[in-house]
Amino acid sequence: MDDVSMTWDTADLDLDAYLARTGATAEPPSLEALGRLQTAHVRTFPFENLDVLLEQHPGVSLAAVQDKFVRRHRGGYCFEHGTLFHAVLTELGYDVEPRLARVGDAAASPRTHLVLIVTLDGRRYLSDPGIGIPPLIPIELADGAEIDGGLWPHQIRVSDSEELGGRAWQLWRKRAGDWEFMHSTDELPVRRVDVEMGHHWTSTAPTTHFRSSLMLNRHGLDPDGTPTLLTVTLDYTAIGRVGEEPKRQDYDPDDLPDLLERAGAKLSEDEAKRLAVRVRELRG
């Protein structure tokens, strides 16, 4: 095993516990199986920044992420989702490589988003379970490739300007009839230390929005099978359905424990009290 492989060791992964938590099954690698696995992941683990707000983030090692997601019934952001999903795919036999992306203006944004590139039958696919509102299934890295499903269609475009590592791949989503840019992924190799550094900046930099707002998103399904999205922000909670405008409601910070648990993020009594205080501070 070479040095790069060693930095992505999966020895701490409890695959059976992960599969039991998500309801997924261990299948031979295929595009369809990858789609089922990604959908199960993003419908189980929310995107959220609660530990950053509480100033208690345990870090992004595989052991820490697995404990947080699988045992403690929480979620996290891209560096956590990507770390866990990378380990799962590796253990299931997928050819998977981590990559870093720039969210927003590629000329001004840091490489602080973690995605995965999966190669199947000679074709490469973007698997992105850790963006704020993730696509449910992978999308091929080919200019103009599109997927549907979930709340919105997604599309891949080749960037007009190449990154240092080669061409860059842009992810777009279509909301309210218009295409919306999400991020740009380059081809440079990624080591574990890059993930640690990205996490450090994202969770501690004074200017990062992860420290100044509450973010939680979780995909779901209505009883009739309609895809939904539950969102909790600093000021409101909302439920979105395909083809409908999200319905927003105000909430009292003291109601956060029940609200967040329904959204897939279980807090201790102490965490809930401290988060309510922090939300009131940020509301001003």
Image (spheres, grey):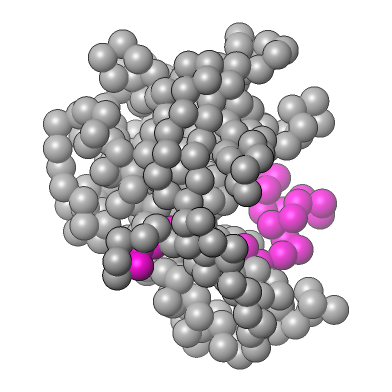
Looking at the image, which residue is at 71% across and 75% down? 235
Tell whether position 12 is magenta.
Answer: no
Position above or below: 197 against 123? below
Question: Image check: 43 left or right of 180?
Answer: left
Residue 197 at least partly seen: no
Magenta segment, which residues? 195-222
Residue 245 at least partly seen: yes
Looking at the image, which residue is at 42% across and 29% down? 139
Position above or below: 175 against 279? above
Quadrant housing the C terminus: bottom right
Question: Image check: 283 left or right of 122?
Answer: right
The x, y position of residue 207, in whole percent, is: 82, 51
Q: How many marks?
A: 0
The one of 40 and 56 positioned closer to us in this rendering: 40
Looking at the image, which residue is at 45% across and 71% down? 263
The one of 282 and 177 positioned closer to us in this rendering: 177
Quadrant housing the N terminus: top left
Looking at the image, which residue is at 47% across and 84% down? 258
Question: Image check: 22 left or right of 164?
Answer: left
Tell whether position 202 is magenta.
Answer: yes
The x, y position of residue 196, in whole percent, is: 57, 41
The x, y position of residue 216, in whole percent, is: 56, 64
The one of 252 and 75 positioned closer to us in this rendering: 252
The x, y position of residue 264, in whole percent, is: 42, 69
